[in-house]
Each structure stands twice: as C-alpha cells, then as structure tokens.
Amino acid sequence: MNALATILPALDELPAFAPGDRVHVLNRAPIGHYRVPIYLRGHVGTVVKVIEPSMIDNEEEGYGRNAGGKRHYYRVALPLPKLWPHYQGAPRDELHVEIFETWLERA
Amino acid sequence: MATEDFVSRLPNDIGGFEAGSVMRVEHVLEPWEKRCHALADVLDFKKIINTEEKRKGVEALGETLIGKLPYYERWIVAFANILFTKTIVSPTELAEKMAEVEARFAEQAAEAG
Amino acid sequence: MAGPHNHGHDHDHSHDPIEMADVPGYYEVMETAIRELLIDKGLIAANDIRRQIDVLDSRTPAVGAQVVARAWTDSAFKERLLADGRAGCEELGITFYDDTQLIVLENTEQVHNLIVCTLCSCYPRPVLGLPPDWYKLKPYRARAVSEPRKVLAEFGTVIRDDVEIRVSDSTAVVRYLVLPRRPAGTEGWSVDALAAIVTRDAMIGVIPVTVESPLTLENEAA
C-alpha cells in the first residue's frame, strides 16, 4: 500500500471548518483577555477563508504563551442587519472578522 | 447596574457602542512616542513582551486610566506593569531611574537655557 | 519641537498649562527610564530602537500606494496579491516586520470595503505606516461596524444601496489593505503617477481615489 495513503494528521492539525461552512460564534464570556468582541457572540456566520498556517491562540499569547496549541483562524462573514437590531444600510452589508477555531462550532 | 458587566466586558470592547461623529484628528508623533512605538516592536521581536501581552496590559489599566491617558502613555505604563510582573524591572528600580533621568533632563535644560 | 496638541484620548478634560517646550513630560521620562534600564540589563540594545525607528519611518502610505498602482496596471500581480496579500507585497520588497498576514480587499462595482480595529488599533503598518488618531479613537472604532454608511458619509463618501458594504474588523493576526477602485480618466498613466493619487484614507476604505486628489501630507515620506 502507498505510504502516502496511510498518513495520519495530528489532532487539531487540520482545519475543522471549510469555506462555505455555517458557523456559530460561541456565547462564552471569559474575563481577563479576549479577542472576540461581545457584539459577535452567539451569532451565526459563514466561513469565507481558512487562514493558513495554524497558529497560536492569541488569547493565550496575551498571558505569555508563545508556542503550542496551534489551530486555525477563520475569516467569517456575518450579515450586518442580523448583528444590529436597528441596522441602517443595505440588506447584504457584511462584517468580516478572523476568529480562532476554539470560538466556533458548526451551526 | 450588574457589576458582572464590568468584569466580563473589556474596556476596549466598544464595537457597536454609541459614540459621536468621527473627528478627523491626527498628529505627527512626538519623538518619545515614536521611540515608544519602536520599543514595543523591539520587545515583541525579542519576545520580552509580545504584542498580545501589550494589549492585555493596556486593558488591565482599567476603564478610568484608559479614558484619562492618551495612546502611547497607556503603552508605556502597561510596559512598566508587565516588566514588574515578569520581575525584569522592579518598581524601585524604575522609580530611581526616572528620578535620575528627570534630574539629567533638568540639568540639560538649565545648561541650554 | 512641540507638535500639534495630542488628542489621542477619548474624553474632554482640562489641560495642564503648556510646559516649556523642551522639558520632557512624565511619560517621556518613564519611556527613557525603561529603555535605559532594559539596555543596562542587556535585554535590548540602543541600536535596536534606532533601527526600528528608521524601519517605521520607511513605511508610509506611499508604500501602499505603490502596491495599489501596480495592482491597477498589472492584472497578474493583482491576482497574486488578492490570493495572498503578504506574498504579493513581499514581491515588491515590503517586509512584514510584525509577522502579520495581509488580505487585500478589492473594491468593485458591487462591493465597498473598509477596515477597522474595534478592540484596539490593528492596522497594516508594514505597508501603510502608523494609523491616524481618528482610526484609534472611539467614534470610528465603535461605529464603523454598526453604522458604516453613516461613518462613510461623515468622510463625504456615499455608497449606493445596491453596493454591498464589507467591514473588516481586525482581531487577530490578519491585517487588511483596501484596493480602491481606479478612477476614470487615468488610462495610460504610469505607476508613479497613479500612486501619487492614492491616499492613505482610500486604502482604509473611507474615501475613494479621485483624479483630483492632491499630494497630501499623508502621501509624503515622513
């Protein structure tokens, strides 16, 4: 059997999501340092791009952790009229933001 | 007002907040501000204080100081606090060095005047 | 020596009487002391700071304007730039000293992009230099994500309702550069002539590029 066919990636090495996937920003409410603004939490968006390569969690980096625990960031598109109850603009206006994998789950 | 809101929301997390019109203010950086920015970059390059640690340090100043201090002033106070926590510099060391620097500047101004 | 008064903070407050221009203030003393302590301890070198100041001075909106002008005149370069903004810029010798990534956002007839950092002041520094105060202050940071069309109108920019607005909020390692639309009447212009009309604010996405854009302070090297 071809050796390439039996290669296994490490856990968390491959992206969990792909462009086009609907994702839900978790409703987690950390104290201390975070990089996912409150206005995004609990909302649903669509993955536009997988940011490569996998990288350190920036929220942990704030505490001096400079290595390890690498996962992917995803550029996620969220419709602005859904983010803001009184949004004044066009229905297809969007927000794009990069979010770390541990803040997302499949919607 | 629930105090949890103050604990769980960072003072810099203001996306969507009410605010006034954008005033297109800008200024040419003072030399010390540019040195402060260069210091931040060098501290990040050398992983003495990485950029995310700096952001967290500024957040940790709290809402009042963040409101009162201009931009680079927030950075330099945050650096001091982080260096203390990492025991790279002690508060006493910094205080003594600041007094020395201040005296040196005063002497230079007197000589120039 | 003393520049225009620094309003890099959010609230109005009474100002201290203007001090003698040449006496460093409290925070400059702190910056000097920290720098000297770190040098004394062998953690940084004086030359590290001097060099980084030169690096910062070498990054101005004129650098970003060259990227835009080349994208306008070389469609193969534009495609590479849109696929990987950092790699495209690196082709031109632009190094990413802060190890950020770059996504170049193309404005089209259908989509208008603008960039913001609601949490702090993330900005494509390697290619645009340092951000203006207004970008770092509350009104822009708070409202660009929730009422972008009103914010754009405050810059004199009106986007039709059939054009989609895309606001990119930098929260992580990626930075953005807006590739503005090339104005009519610039056919046959050289890269340098095109670069001269591309302003910093057009690359943030708050104003368009126009043929009448004067060479402004933003475009001049520091």
Image (spheres, coloured by chain):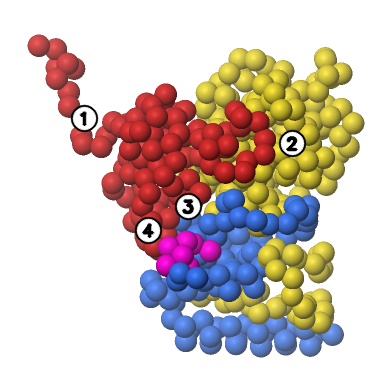
Chain colours: A red, B blue, C yellow
Amino acid on which disc 3 is placed: Ile
Residue, disc 2:
C202
Q: Residue at x 41, y 44 (%)?
A: A42
x then y, percent, for residue A57 = 36, 48
**SS majority, magenta:** helix
- Is tag 3's residue or tag 1's residue first in the polypeptide sequence? 1
Question: Circles 2 and 4: CB distance less than 8 Å?
Answer: no
Amino acid type at circle 4 is: Pro
Q: Which residue is mark 3?
A: A38
Compared to residue B80, the image places residue B36 above or below, namely above
- Chain-order first, disc 1 or disc 4: 1
Q: Check the residue under mark 3 and report the chain it is in.
A: A
Q: Residues within 10 Å of mark 2 (few under 14, many from 20)?
A: many
Left or right of residue B96: residue B4: left
Q: Which residue is mark 1?
A: A9
Q: Label 3 to label 1, Cα distance in Å?
A: 34 Å
Residue A67 in the image: state x and y as whole percent: 32, 50
The reply to the same-chain question for discs 3 and 4 is yes
Residue C48 makes an appearance in the image: no
Q: Secondary structure at mark 2?
A: helix
For badge 1, the amino acid type reads Pro
Name the secondary structure under disc 1. Answer: loop
